[in-house]
Image (cartoon, rainbow, N blue to C red):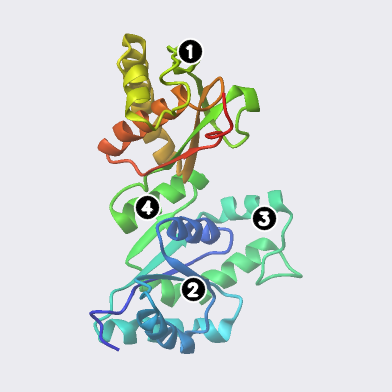
Amino acid sequence: MNPSIAPRTVFVSGLSGGGKSTAMAALEDLGFYCVDNLPPQLVAQFVDLCSKATPPIRKVAVAVDTREEGFLVQVPGVVQQLRAEGHDVEVIFLDCADEVLVNRYRETRRVHPLSPAGSVQEGIDRERKLLLEVAQLADFRVDTTVLNVHQLKEAMARHVSGGVRATVLSLISFGFRFGPPTSAELLFDVRFLPNPHFEPALRAKTGEDPEVARYVLDDARTKELLRRLEDLLGFLLPLYDREGKAYLTIGIGCTGGQHRSVAIALALARLLRAAGREVNVSHRDLGKGE
């Protein structure tokens, strides 16, 4: 395999209960193709297949745990082999204080995988010994003792991509006549704006039409609304980013979902995209008539 086209490969290991599932979910959100507990003898073959896929898979994450002890002892050799061949390989190890792990198992009422008939502490002690060599290979160690789910995701995102993954925004225009969208997490009512429905030349058009957009957007109230929305979202969105929120749906509603809400959604999307945000726009009730 040519290392220049091989995918970036991240091995994620650590103590059971230490947050591997959360870490893998964070990597998946960052665009990694994630596989759980792949037998080490198949890793190199799997990486090769990823490079030959159409289109090629550029980022791969492999979770490594102690469910299969026979597989575990082979992991260091696989990592060293891939590195020796010049591949971009990284090992992330999740550690956690024993007492916190014991409490987590107690709260979830789960048995430790390495001590199904004994105490959780016995399982932790055994697992630490089994993972010692993998831990020594780690390029990045995360102590999850005091981290919640969101903080762990943020730590992973900052390390792997150099920053927190930005929340993807979905703007939905709609008409209150047909009910608000149940998926909307933030909802703004723009029925106080001038209504093109009462202008004969504009009634049959929609907020996608430049004439209607100008009618709505040129009003002083609209300009102030967009300024304040931009201000509010400029405050909220970085907080959602840090929390690890992958998607946020914003509803913009007018009476029938034809004119004002459509124009505002499109204008707000332009402002957010200019600020570097990924924004999707849909018009739920367009064409239903106001």
Which disc number belongs to residue 131? 2
- Look at the picture and state if 177 lies above or below 61: above
Q: What amino acid does circle 4 point to?
A: Ala
- In x, y percent, where is residue 271? 30, 31
Picture quadrant where residue 8 is located: bottom left
Residue 192, image x, y percentages: 47, 11
The answer to whether the residue labelled 1 contacts the one labelled 2, judged by CB atoms less than 8 Å apart, is: no
> SS for tag 1?
helix
**What is the three-letter code of the residue carrying label 2?**
Leu
Left or right for 28, reference 117? left
Label 3 and label 1: CA atoms lie apart by 63 Å
Crowding near pointer 4: few (<14 within 10 Å), some, many (20+)?
A: many
Distance between mark 2 and mark 4 Cα atoms: 24 Å
Mark 4 vs mark 3, CA separation in Å = 26 Å
Residue 222 lies, with reference to residue 179, above or below; the image says above
Q: Which residue is mark 4?
A: 157
Amino acid type at mark 3: Tyr
Mark nearer the N terminus (3 vs 1): 3
Q: Report helix, strand or loop for mark 4.
A: helix
Q: Closer to the camera, 270 or 8? A: 270
* Residue bearing mark 3: 105
Q: Which residue corresponds to mark 1?
A: 198
